[in-house]
Amino acid sequence: MAPRKIIIDTDPGQDDAVAILLALASPEDVDVLGITAVAGNVPLELTAKNARIVCELAGKTDVPVFAGCDRPLGRDLVTAEHVHGKTGLDGPSLSDPQMPLQEQHAVDFIIETVRAHDTGTITLCPLGPLTNVATAFQRAPDIVEKVQQIVLMGGAYFEVGNITPTAEFNIYVDPEAADIVFKSDVDIVVMPLDVTHKALVTKPRNDAFRALGTPVGVAVAEMTDFFERFDKEKYGSAGAPLHDPCVTAYLIRPDLFTGRHVNVEVETSSDLTMGMTVADWWRVTGRPANAMFMGDVDADGFFGLLTERLARL
Ligand code: RIB
Ligand code: CA
C-alpha cells in the first residue's frame, strides 16, 4: 500500500521530536509532505528552529519546514518551558539548523497542499495547539471536506488535565481552535493523556534508545531523560510519557491502539474548566460521535516499533 501523505503540525518539544523522527524513519508508511510549526511548548521562533534541528538530526533536510501562527486565535500564548526547558529541546546538545525555513506561511502551505491533492489523500497530524489547522479551516472552508483524516495528540478524559486540573496543554493553549477542529466533521483520531500516559519511557526503554549508539538513539535517550522530570515529579510516573509519538505510531500500526468513537466537545467559556475535552465515553448525552478517542496502547509493541524504526536513522 502506498505511504500516507501527511503534514505534521508541531511545537517541538522533545516528544514532538520523537514523533517526527519516527515518521521520517518510516517512508514506507508515511510520506511527510511538510512540517508546520506552531507556537506552543515554546514560542514560534523556537518551534520553527527545533523542527529543523530534528530534520537535520534525522538526516532528512529535504523535508520543508514552515512557520505558522505565533499565538492562539483569541488569547495570549501559554508556553511550557517548565516541562521542555527554555529551548524546547533541552537534554541533548544539538547544533543550530543550517537548513532554511520556508518563506511560505504554514497555514498557506496546509491550504495549498490539501487543495492540490485528491480528496481523501492528505492526513493532518497536529502535535501541538490546533491554531494552524483551525486558521486554515477558517481561511479556506473548501479544504475541510477534502482532508482524509486528522490524527492529533490532545485532550483527556479519565486522566483530566496536565496544565490545569481539567485541561490538557495542547487544547488549553487554544481552546477556540480545538473547538473549530472538533466541530469540523473531519474524521478525527485523538490520542489523549488517557493513552499517552501509558506510553512511558521506563529505564529499560530509555536504555534501549541509548544502546542504539547512534546520534539519534543517544539524542532521544537524552531528550526523554530531561523531559521525564515533570511527569515523574507530578504523577510519580515510571518515565516520560511519549505523547506525540502515539500519533505517528498510529499511522504505522493502528492495531497498537484501542478506543471508542464518541462525542468530544471542548470547553471554551468557563474559566474553571477552560480547554477541557468533554468526552462522552459512556455515551450518555446522545450527542453524535465526532472522534475516535483512544484509551489504551500496547506499550511494549509501541516501544518495539519506535526503537526498531529509530535504529534506521
Ligand atoms: O500535553 C502534552 C502535549 O503538550 C504534547 O504535545 C507536548 O508536546 C505538549 O505540546
Ligand atoms: Ca507537542
Image (cartoon, helix red, strand yellow):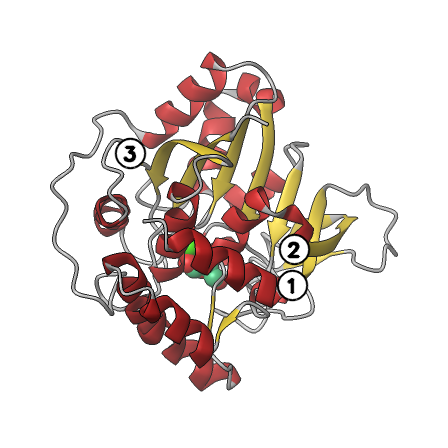
- Residue type at numbered disc 2: Leu
Q: Tell me which corner region of the image, top left, top right, bottom left or bottom right, holds residue 199.
A: bottom right
Nearer to me, 244 or 87: 244
Instruction: Name the N-terminal-most of marks 3 and 2.
Output: 3
Residue 70, above or below 142: below
Residue 131, above or below 310: above
Mark in the foreground, 1 or 3: 1
What residue lies at 47% left-to-right and 64% top-to-bottom? 242
Q: x, y percentage for residue 56?
A: 21, 45
Secondary structure of the residue carrying numbered label 2: helix
Q: Is residue 230 left or right of residue 274?
A: left
Q: x, y percentage for residue 190?
A: 62, 50
For label 3, count other residues whose C-alpha is less than 10 Å away and answer few (under 14), some (14-19) or many (20+): many
Residue 298, numbered label: 1
Measured Cα–Cα span from mark 1 to mark 2: 5 Å
What residue lies at 29% left-to-right and 33% top-to-bottom? 63
- Residue type at numbered disc 3: Phe
Nearer to me, 183 or 234: 234
What residue lies at 39% left-to-right and 44% top-to-bottom? 25
Residue 148, numbered label: none
Residue 66, numbered label: 3
Q: x, y percentage for residue 306?
A: 47, 57
For ligand 1, the image quadrant comes to bottom left
- Residue type at numbered disc 1: Asp
Instruction: Name the N-terminal-most of marks 1 and 2.
Output: 2
Would you say residue 73 is visible in this rendering?
no
Nearer to me, 49 or 300: 300
Nearer to me, 201 or 161: 201
Q: Is mark 1 within 8 Å of ligand 1?
A: no
Mark in the foreground, 3 or 2: 2
Instruction: Name the N-terminal-most of marks 1 and 3.
Output: 3
